[in-house]
């Protein structure tokens, strides 16, 4: 799939968003956001006041009331626009997903053995438990009609539509690579799969629902924040409403000025209530989900993304996450009487045609250690013997010479079959290597055992830095491995993880997660195998690999389409970003109010108490311009902050206290100061235009 | 602030801290039920009342128990006032208190407000003073401490259904903290000259004849009016004076220790029989802050991290010191118009006892309004405009700068939850305080607790300035009259009880309005706080790590103090602008 990425104000999105912003003026839509509903009511009310003023008996000049009313409507439209823009991005992503759900036909079969015959059935009529046979180049061009599990056959499958990864992957019955996703395509061979999801419940359906529904479901923190915003709105409602009697009393007591007008009170109210965060709140949530999508992670709910921000323990599988998935040759350990070079030479020959990473690494090591150049296998007249599940060996035949490498047991059988003898010294070496947690490969020339090759885990480049970063974020990393303690300890030290679980069984993993949770920690893990499912279900944040089994995907609350276990770190950062953006915008919004007070209060009461002009710190031109400037600033700041809401506040792994200090300074102190400058500028603009 | 004021402030803080630490240790021991001897003495009391002290109550039951207890207290105070004429210990033959005043006073003393619409020496019998008012001084203080303790338990416990036993908490804190401390303090006061007797009022002959004016009254007792419609004033002369007597010391001790503030006499702590000298004055000031300060440290002890308690105490102290500096500064500045006339250059001494002076009067004014005490040694009405705005603002912040016994701590913790919520989001985690996640339910309760008082203060003030009955009580027109009403409502709704004076508040209108404000201001905050306690107690306590927001240290102190100030400022800035700020600008303007 060509997943599009959009620039911030992409015309393709901004246009429809502007239209959508108008459509969102429907009261039913506004009802969901109580803060903006107050703005809505205020805008409608001032519009009525304007109509009254047009009739000649207004409380202030019609032009002033109109200006305030218009800017209140703009405030509303800007907030709608922000939401529509964020939704537009999500919708575009959903649309590209929906393209996967094209009408297609499936061949339903009775059992896995059935060949050729089957009933033609619409893909959307398939039910959980149905068996379907998919073959490359069949009626539906090998399109896999539904999510399922392969029960027979093996095929290469193009999953680029989901993952964006162009290299096909092998899917086969049994093991951890048996899950297929509807909408992907069989490129070669055939498979029979058992459908695991009813129509509307498939993976793609869930993705679309998640992307489109992001704004409908509020996350727990969003609900708590909304409560606070509503409370603030109520307080400010009382603050402004009480100003009318206060003003009436003051006018009577001072015998000067006019009572404050309703237009000014509405303007003050809208300026005080936290419109900035309320207007951007849903956009922040939608944008967070959208960012996850861009990182190729599908979360089942916004709650899961938020929980990711809270995680303080990460369980990481050793293989594939901390170490490269493949081991690499690290040493040649010759049998007694054999030189190391001789062993290296044989090992290199046996590996020349072996394209597996392990095989390549043997060739590389031989070159490094003894400068043994790669030789052309064809020129040597050698023929390659492929690895097979029966022999569990591979190698070359060069004339009479049979070079083999393989697991110790396989080689023992091989040499003993040729009346050879497996030297005890080599056996001791093999045991020693195993104990270290490395993998021994034994090399034999005919019936003669030459020695062993040690294959070692290689820690991924840069992973140590990531772990250090996590530690600064306050997240503990735990490596989980089936290796013995010694090996695990060695790799753990090399990778810089905080702790490790060695010789881990799925039950151990589950127990470890429970132990952390009982100690009050939140645990995240990644997993792919079926035996990971219980642990995934127990973990607070569970990212299943897309290459993993259906069971794993269902147990997790996120699926990583790239199947990249280090993605967990990005997930955590995105979760944090979402919360930080909300918190920072809230702080900014509340801090803004101080300046607005200083703009509006003197303007509203200077007629009654001329001394209050002293409070006009910004030196605003006139009371009318002061009020209008505050209202305009309040509307424009929403637009100005849309990029921040969509992109998110940048997360820095510097520890909680430093992060708080920084954000308090930027959004708290900044929020105090910015409106003083902003309102003054707008006032200057109004004065220059002669509207003050 | 001059050197004398600074020295007084430093001495005050030093003595306060010195006493707060052992008090906290003792309070924690009592509230945890670790005072074994006490438990043996309590046991028969519990048996008699049918209370099982070990039984844990859920938050709702705890709240209902306290509400019921306070309702009974209110009814008792009301009944005693109404019946005092026929009850003993009434040497001056005081008549029954009017229904509206009795209603107001009953709520006032049960809610720890001690707003006094009446004047003690001219209306209350000794029995009413002792059995109604002094008893409620103990019980309302105990109620506050019980709620604070329940909230502390909410933080300290994990996955627990209960927040303690209300009856046991009330009994323990009354018997083993409030009673002994008050007894000691009362003895000290007596040693300084505070009176303690049941004798009738004394008539004494004064050395100097007193000249004064009084309106001529007609046969019905109403003042006769002269041609201008003003009361016809006649010069009078007197050589005799009535000295009010009574069991003062016993009430005085708990008045300050329990941050009650209801004076035995109308002049409150400015009266020489309540507060005879500088030493007794110093002791009163320390006593007002002692339990609120100690409770912060109790909080730290019981949640297992003393730093948390010190942090709250530091935030309170920071706000307190700022207030002292501001008030003392404006009082020392004095009134520029008087200075221009050359009649006063030593600062503003109007309404102050000369034996206490500006520094002590300013410090006392801040202490009594920072804590929800309300005892006074100077007339707050006569403070300079911005000097008077300081006590006003301190009350409007929600009585969290030390605050009332118990209520100060739980009020501050509500603000801490708010600060933690916003700050927690800003560092990208679900906000948590002491390992407890702050979620929608807690925020809802925090919102209610923070909403109630501004609603009462602003709504009540709006009502009073609109109603004829409300405006009728104003003695000074214009902005100052507005300040007087705002002060009365702020004092009542935040359960402070001090009066700006100048407002004739012993009228049915104000007695009813302020009664409702005191009642809601106390209980509509207390119940959500207990709900928070219950919800927190049920939650698991999460472990703190490098990623969790540290809720101790200077950064958090600043954050917490900033949150309190910001919320208060946002709520009251417009009202303050129309009252004290306008007055100040008018006074100092050109």
Image (spheres, rainbow, N blue to C red):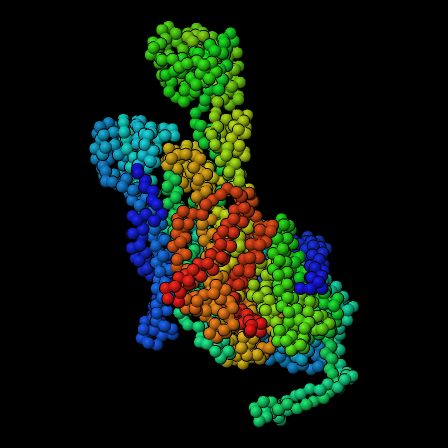
| In this picture, residue B401 sits left or right of residue A342 | right
> Quick check: can you spot residue A645?
yes
Residue B102 vertical position relative to residue B284 in the rendered view, above or below: below
Compared with A408, A277 (above or below) is below
Give the total number of marks visible in the rendering: 0
Q: Quadrant location of the C terminus of chain B?
A: bottom right
* In the image: residue B248, left or right of residue A569: right
Q: B545 left or right of A21?
A: right
Image quadrant holding the N terminus of chain B, namely bottom right
Q: Say which residue appears at 71% left-offset and 57% top-offset.
A: B14
Q: As displayed, is residue A324 above or below residue A296? A: above
Residue B141 shows in the view: no
Q: Residue at x 57, y 94 (%)?
A: B227
Residue B559 image offset from top left, x and y in percent: 56, 54
Task: Report which quarter residue A687 is drawn in.
Answer: bottom left
Residue under the point 27% across and 27% down: A188
Could you say which is closer to the camera, residue B282 or residue A187?
B282
Q: Position of residue A312 (x, y in %)?
A: 51, 41
Q: Is residue A8 above or below residue B578?
A: above
Residue B182 drawn at (x, y percent):
71, 64
Picture residue at 44% right of the left edge, 75% below the top: A259
* Residue A395, horizontal then vertical, whole percent: 39, 14
Front position in the image: A392 or B132: A392
Residue situated in front as seen by the camera: B404 or A515: B404
């Amino acid at each position: 799939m060509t997943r599009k990425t959009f620039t911030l104000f992409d015309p393709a999105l901004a246009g429809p968003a502007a239209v959508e912003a108008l459509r969102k003026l429907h009261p039913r839509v506004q009802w969901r956001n109580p803060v903006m509903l107050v703005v809505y009511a205020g805008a409608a009310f001032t519009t009525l006041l304007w109509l009254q003023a047009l009739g000649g008996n207004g409380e202030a000049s019609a032009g002033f009331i109109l200006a305030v009313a218009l800017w209140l409507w703009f405030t509303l439209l800007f907030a709608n626009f922000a939401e529509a823009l964020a939704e537009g991005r999500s919708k575009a992503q959903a649309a590209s997903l929906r393209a996967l759900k094209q009408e297609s036909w499936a061949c339903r079969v009775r059992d896995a053995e059935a060949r050729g015959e089957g009933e033609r059935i619409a893909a959307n009529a398939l039910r959980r438990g149905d068996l379907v046979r998919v073959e490359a180049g069949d009626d539906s061009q090998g399109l896999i009609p539904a999510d399922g599990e392969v029960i027979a056959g093996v095929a290469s499958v193009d999953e680029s539509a989901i993952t964006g990864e162009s290299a096909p992957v092998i899917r086969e019955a049994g093991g951890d690579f048996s899950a297929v996703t509807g909408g992907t395509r069989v490129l070669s061979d055939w498979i029979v799969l058992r459908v695991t999801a009813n129509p509307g419940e498939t993976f793609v359906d869930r993705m679309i629902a998640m992307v489109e529904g992001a704004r409908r479901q509020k996350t727990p923190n969003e609900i708590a924040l909304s409560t606070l915003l509503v409370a603030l709105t109520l307080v400010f409602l009382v603050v402004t409403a009480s100003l009318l009697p206060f003003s009436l009393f003051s006018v009577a007591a001072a015998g000067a000025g006019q009572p404050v007008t309703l237009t000014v009170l509405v303007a003050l109210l809208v300026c005080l209530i936290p419109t900035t965060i309320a207007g951007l709140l849903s956009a922040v949530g939608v944008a967070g989900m959208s960012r996850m999508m861009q990182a190729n992670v599908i979360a089942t709910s916004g709650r899961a993304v938020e929980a990711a921000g809270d995680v303080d323990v990460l369980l990481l599988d050793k293989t594939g996450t901390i170490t490269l998935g493949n081991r690499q040759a690290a040493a040649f350990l010759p049998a007694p009487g054999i030189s190391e070079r001789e062993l290296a030479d044989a090992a290199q020959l046996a590996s020349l045609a072996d394209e597996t990473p392990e095989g390549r690494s043997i060739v590389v090591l031989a070159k490094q250690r003894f400068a043994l150049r790669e030789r052309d296998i064809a020129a040597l007249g050698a023929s390659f013997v492929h690895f097979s599940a029966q022999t569990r060996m591979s190698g070359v035949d060069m004339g009479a010479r049979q070079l083999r490498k393989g697991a110790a047991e396989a080689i023992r059988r091989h040499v003993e079959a040729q009346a050879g003898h497996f030297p005890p010294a080599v056996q001791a070496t093999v045991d020693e290597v195993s104990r270290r947690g490395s993998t021994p490969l034994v090399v034999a020339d005919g019936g003669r055992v030459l020695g062993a090759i040690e294959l070692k885990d290689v820690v991924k480049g840069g992973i140590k830095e990531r772990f250090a970063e996590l530690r600064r974020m306050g997240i503990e990393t735990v490596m989980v491995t089936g290796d013995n303690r010694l090996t695990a300890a060695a790799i753990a030290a090399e990778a810089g993880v905080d702790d490790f679980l060695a010789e881990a069984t799925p039950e151990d993993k589950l127990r470890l997660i429970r132990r952390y949770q009982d100690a009050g920690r939140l645990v995240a893990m990644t997993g792919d195998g079926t035996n990971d499912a219980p642990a995934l279900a127990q973990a607070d944040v569970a990212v299943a690999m897309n290459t993993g089994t259906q069971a794993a995907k269902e147990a997790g609350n996120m699926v990583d389409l790239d199947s990249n276990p280090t993605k967990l770190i990005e997930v955590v950062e995105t979760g944090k970003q979402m919360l930080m953006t909300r918190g920072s915008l809230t702080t900014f919004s509340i801090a803004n109010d101080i300046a607005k007070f200083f703009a509006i209060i003197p303007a509203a009461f200077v007629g009654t108490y001329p001394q209050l002009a002293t409070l006009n710190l910004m030196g605003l031109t006139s009371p009318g311009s002061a009020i209008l400037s505050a209202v305009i600033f309040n509307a424009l700041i929403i637009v100005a902050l849309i990029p921040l809401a969509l992109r998110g506040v940048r997360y820095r792994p510097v520890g909680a206290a430093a992060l708080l200090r920084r954000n308090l300074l930027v959004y708290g102190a900044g929020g105090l100061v910015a409106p003083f400058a902003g309102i003054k500028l707008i006032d200057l603009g109004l004065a220059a235009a002669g509207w003050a | 602030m001059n050197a004398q004021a600074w020295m007084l402030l430093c001495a005050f803080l030093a003595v306060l801290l010195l006493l707060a630490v052992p008090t906290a240790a003792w309070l924690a021991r009592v509230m945890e039920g670790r005072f074994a001897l006490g438990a043996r003495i309590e046991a028969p009391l519990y048996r008699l009342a049918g209370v099982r002290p070990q039984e844990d109550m859920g938050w709702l039951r705890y709240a209902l128990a306290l509400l019921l207890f306070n309702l009974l207290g209110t009814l008792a105070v009301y009944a005693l006032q109404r019946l005092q004429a026929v009850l003993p210990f009434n040497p001056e033959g005081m008549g029954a208190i009017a229904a509206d005043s009795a209603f107001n006073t009953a709520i006032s003393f049960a809610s720890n407000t001690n707003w006094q619409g009446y004047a003690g020496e001219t209306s209350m019998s000794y029995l009413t003073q002792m059995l109604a008012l002094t008893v409620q001084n103990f019980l309302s203080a105990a109620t506050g401490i019980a709620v604070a303790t329940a909230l502390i338990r909410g933080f300290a416990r994990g996955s627990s259904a209960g927040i303690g036993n209300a009856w046991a908490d009330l009994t323990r804190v009354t018997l083993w903290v409030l009673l002994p401390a008050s007894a000691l303090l009362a003895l000290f006061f007596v040693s300084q000259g505070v009176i303690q007797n049941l004798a009738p009022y004394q008539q004494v002959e004064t050395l100097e004849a007193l000249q004064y004016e009084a309106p001529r009254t007609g046969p019905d007792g109403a003042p006769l009016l002269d041609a201008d419609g003003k009361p016809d004033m006649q010069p009078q002369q007197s050589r005799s004076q009535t000295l009010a007597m009574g069991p003062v010391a016993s009430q005085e001790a708990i008045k300050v220790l329990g941050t009650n503030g209801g004076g035995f006499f109308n002049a409150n702590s400015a009266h020489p029989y309540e507060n005879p000298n500088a030493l007794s004055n110093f002791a009163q000031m320390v006593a007002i802050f002692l339990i609120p300060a100690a409770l912060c440290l109790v909080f730290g002890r019981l949640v297992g991290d003393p730093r948390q308690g010190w942090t709250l105490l530091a935030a309170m102290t920071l706000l307190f010191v700022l207030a002292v500096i501001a008030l003392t500064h404006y009082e020392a500045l004095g009134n520029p118009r008087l200075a221009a006339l050359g009649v006063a250059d030593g600062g503003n001494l109007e309404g102050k006892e000369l034996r206490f002076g500006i520094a002590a009067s300013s410090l006392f004014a801040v202490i009594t309004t920072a804590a929800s005490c309300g005892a006074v040694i100077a007339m707050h009405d006569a403070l300079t405009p911005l000097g008077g705005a300081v006590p006003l603002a301190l009350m409007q912040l929600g009585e969290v700068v030390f605050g009332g016994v118990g209520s100060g701590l739980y009020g501050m913790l509500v603000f801490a939850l708010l600060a933690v919520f916003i700050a927690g989001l800003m560092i990208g985690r679900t906000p948590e305080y002491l390992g407890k996640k702050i979620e929608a339910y807690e925020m809802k309760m925090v919102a209610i607790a923070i909403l109630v008082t501004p609603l009462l203060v602003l709504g009540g003030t709006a009502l009073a300035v609109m109603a004829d009955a409300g405006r009728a009580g104003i003695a000074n027109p214009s902005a100052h009259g507005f300040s007087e009403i705002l002060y009365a409502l702020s004092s009542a709704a935040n359960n402070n009880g001090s009066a700006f004076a100048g407002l004739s508040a012993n009228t049915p209108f104000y007695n009813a309005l302020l009664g409702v404000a005191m009642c809601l201001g106390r209980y509509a905050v207390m119940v959500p706080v207990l709900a928070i306690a219950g919800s927190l107690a049920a939650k698991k306590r999460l472990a703190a790590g490098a990623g969790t927001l540290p809720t101790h240290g200077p950064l958090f102190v600043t954050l917490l103090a900033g949150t309190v100030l910001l919320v208060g400022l946002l709520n009251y800035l417009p009202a303050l602008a129309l009252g004290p700020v306008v007055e100040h600008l008018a006074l100092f303007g050109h």
